[in-house]
Amino acid sequence: MKWMNLARFTGHAVTFASLVALQACGGSGGGDNVSPPPAVAGKIALFAGDVGGVGNLDGARGNATFYGIQSLTVDPAGNLMVAEVGNHAVRKISSDGTVSTAAGGDMVAAFADGQGVAAKFLNPQFIAADTKGNWYVSDNGEYIRKVTPQGAVTTLANVSTNWNCQSSSMVFCHVGKPLAVDVAGTVYFTANNQLRKLGANGQMETLVNAISSRGLPTPAFSFVYLASGLVVDAQGTIYIADRNQPVIRKVSPAGEMTILAGSEESSQAVDGQGSAARFVELQAITMDAVGNLYVLEGNGAIRKVTPAGLVSTVRQPTQTWSSGWSYSFTGFARDAAGNFYLSALGAGGNAPVFGNT
């Protein structure tokens, strides 16, 4: 296969090896299914998708096409799961780069529970996996859907009907936001500046209410301006990446919200402890097995945050992207081997891929 310093693609998932372990990764621009070469640390390699293509084709590595990847997650089996708004589908990418449609698809926006491609999604925006391999999807800013490993889709809740959205000041009434799932199967999500949870028993409640009766932040809690990602650890502690106020918020199981790292003031990126650290537009967040957080910034940098709030830089944007980068990131995930996966879109749906130079 041929590697390129700069290629154009639409909605592809790409991966690069971590600093610790160099994993074999790569992709094919010609549709072949040859074994990929080892990745070079800090470089981006195409993981799945047809370079330059757009569509909903399943298949091996370079034969598959994507359209509008919104978010990514890695399930316990090591599959990379994709929420795809353009195809109205949940897609699965196996460890060898083979792409299949788990549920929905056909570029048709509709709403139906069911099995596999018979199920329909309106606008699957964010996806998370539980420890049993089930996937949870926030659909069209209103519904939380569950997809089993066998592809059976059910609707767990119509979130927009579960609180009062009549007030003119309550303008963000849809879930259309990231979600996370704990070991008990509880789904956490943010909407209307509230952190909500949906229990495995179907009961929904507010964990943190950051809005007072006058629409202002209560003294006890910080204002969740725009959550770009959620994760939850084994102890039930939730971490929120706040995009417009670039901080990592920490919420205890009892609902106490604090700032783990960063400052609500805009700044250039700064490593450091807690409030001394600074972030640049937090785009997405993921977590490793020991509780370290990894956040993707809008400029392509990847930062690490320990459970104690110590922030360091894993990858500078200039280590991975060219100075002419003009694309936006969408999905971000990390597997058990320490590989990071990301997707990005630009004008016309195009984005560059840095290959093995």
Image (tube, rainbow, N blue to C red):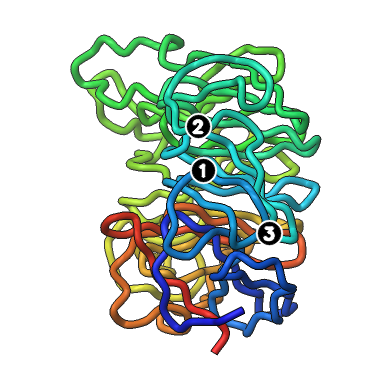
What residue is disc 2 on?
A: 106
The relative height of residue 265 versus residue 319 in the rendered view (above or below) is above
Residue of label 1: 56
Kindly identify the amino acid type of the residue bearing the numbered disc 2.
Asp
Is residue 218 rendered to the left or right of residue 257?
A: left
The residue shown at (53%, 40%) is 83
Identified by mark 1, the residue type is Asn
Q: Is residue 104 left or right of residue 269?
A: right
Distance from the alpha carbon under mark 2 to that under mark 3: 21 Å
Q: In the picture, which quadrant includes the C terminus?
A: bottom right
Residue found 44% across the figure and 27% down from its top: 108
Q: Marks 1 and 2: CB-CB under 8 Å?
A: yes
Query: Does the image show residue 254?
Result: no
Q: Is residue 176 left or right of 95 when viewed as pictured?
A: left
User: Horizontal and vertical percent for residue 141?
Assistant: 41, 26
- Name the secondary structure under disc 2: loop
Tell me if mark 1 has few (under 14), some (14-19) or many (20+) residues whose alpha carbon lies within 10 angstroms of its own.
Answer: many
What's under tag 3, amino acid-wise? Answer: Gly
Query: Residue drawn at (73%, 75%), measured in percent from left and top?
Result: 24
Circle 1 or circle 3, nearest the eye: 1
User: Residue 335: in sight, yes or no?
Assistant: yes
- Residue holding disc 3: 97
The image quadrant that residue 321 belongs to is: bottom left
Residue 327 placement: quadrant: bottom left
Query: Which is nearer the N-term, disc 1 or disc 2?
Result: 1
| Residue 209: percent from left, percent from top | 43, 26
